Amino acid sequence: MRVLVLHPGAMGASIGAAVSSAGHEVIGVASGRSRATIDRAREAQITLVETLEEVIGRVDVVLSICPPEAALDVAREVRQSGYDGIYVDGNAVAPETATAIGELFDNNFVDGGIVGPPAWRAGATRFYLSGAMAKDVVELFEDSLVTARAISGGAGAASAVKMCYAAYTKGSSALVLAIRALAEDNGVTETLLAEWDISQKGMRDSSERSALGTSPKAWRFAGEMREIAATFNAAGLPNGFHLAAAEIYERMAHFKNDDPARLDQVIEALLPKR
Amino acid sequence: MRVLVLHPGAMGASIGAAVSSAGHEVIGVASGRSRATIDRAREAQITLVETLEEVIGRVDVVLSICPPEAALDVAREVRQSGYDGIYVDGNAVAPETATAIGELFDNNFVDGGIVGPPAWRAGATRFYLSGAMAKDVVELFEDSLVTARAISGGAGAASAVKMCYAAYTKGSSALVLAIRALAEDNGVTETLLAEWDISQKGMRDSSERSALGTSPKAWRFAGEMREIAATFNAAGLPNGFHLAAAEIYERMAHFKNDDPARLDQVIEALLPKR
């Protein structure tokens, strides 16, 4: 199979490498991409072409792995090229967004949701897939480092899994960072940490790890938090947890591509200047 | 010392019992209280009088332990009685609320924050106290089941500890319950749980425990969540996490005084009727 990956960041490059390792040809588009994206694609054995137009007529599957706020635009661009093969949206978007993308591709649409880190080791990364052609996409990952799973529920189901999963992992990380900032602002950090050490063991460490782990990636979490908020809203559940999480990650956006930030640096970023 | 406790619920009765066990006389007011409160007070060796007026002239310490939304009213009622002894607000209120209460009692005000379950076993419950007279209040709990700790920072500090602590415990419980409802609404519960069993071990159990643990108490958590939201707001941090948590607990309020509800009952309460 010939698979086009749009547009490989850290996750997309590893997904492309997995498809490539399973014996398929993996292609990326260079035009409009950053130096980092292009270098990453090359390292992942992704063949680069200059434009979408020159390749779209000869691919069997398009795999969209991009920031959630770009997912609909990427899908529209592919649709407008006249493409009529399998289209997989692997992005962290609300089921409603996935459904809207799906309408562009009818039965050729496969909804995807990726859980775990970029797939550079076996068993760490699951790719949930739903929709009529989900099983065909699962086959692309045979014997690769990505565990691909077809689930029932049609377009939206795989995205819902991703939304629910990240709602806790990224939502609770934002919460704990906000709490550390709140304690600092109130001058009670030492007392809170001493209490956590008694009755919430691990919170001190996990709050420090949250700072290190999220700071370089926070810039792209805000859009995902808004997709999660929309998912809660569509279910008639309160969306405030993740609108607040989006705001926390927005305040951390300037750590992009830096070394992981320490908790004290994150707290300084979160609290308004006085 | 003679200590008046206003108005002992499950936590207040155990705090009163601790003061009583330390050799002090502990008094409660019966008028306007429920049968359950009166029975609980008697079991906790709290002497009941009919009205505040008949006792307020001869007590050394007033200890307010009540739902957060009643804290300011209780304080005003005591102030209007002409009381000029030590006043301890032990409630789950924002530092700003504590400070407003403190202004009624000047240097006789002690801010308090209770962490842990009702104090029926040693080492489980900490009572943080701040303000000029905090050390005098710590002495009331000598050798009792309550670990009382004076902390620096004046009025508001002890409340801030409580707000930060409950922001995580009760905030993350509300989040995980909301996520279970979201997964159910989207028909992806089984997939989410299977993923949690791989990569977020313990989440399946902790979501079920959250339902059992919070459902009978949820009715009084909403006010506390709003105090926490106000605390975030005062620090210039997003308050949406806890406004959402307040809404989750409000939808669970009808489980008050029932047996702990199962997760499926909580999910039904959280999702709007379709």
Image: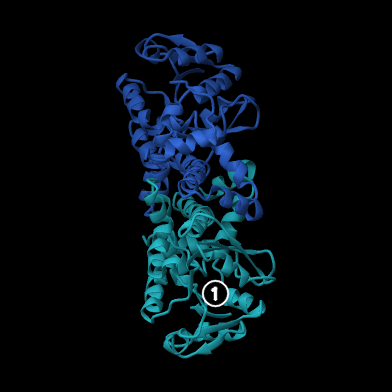
Chain colours: A cyan, B blue
Q: Residue at x 40, y 72 (%)?
A: A70
On screen, residue B92 above or below A242 = above
A167 to B63, vertically: above or below: below
User: Which residue bears the numbered disc 1?
Assistant: A12
In the rendered structure, the answer to whether residue A211 lies left or right of residue A220 reads: right
Task: Say if residue B111 shows up in the picture.
Answer: yes
Front-most of residues A122 and A98: A98
Quadrant for the C terminus of chain B, please: top left
Q: Position of residue A258 (x, y in %)?
A: 52, 75
Q: Where A101 falls versus B123 (above or below)?
A: below
| Residue B167 visible here | no
- SS state under label 1: helix
Q: Residue at x 32, y 22 (%)?
A: B77
Within 10 Å of the Cα at label 1, are there few (<14), some (14-19), or many (20+) other Cα atoms?
A: many
Q: Amino acid at mark 1?
A: Gly
Residue A8 horizontal/vertical position (percent): 52, 78
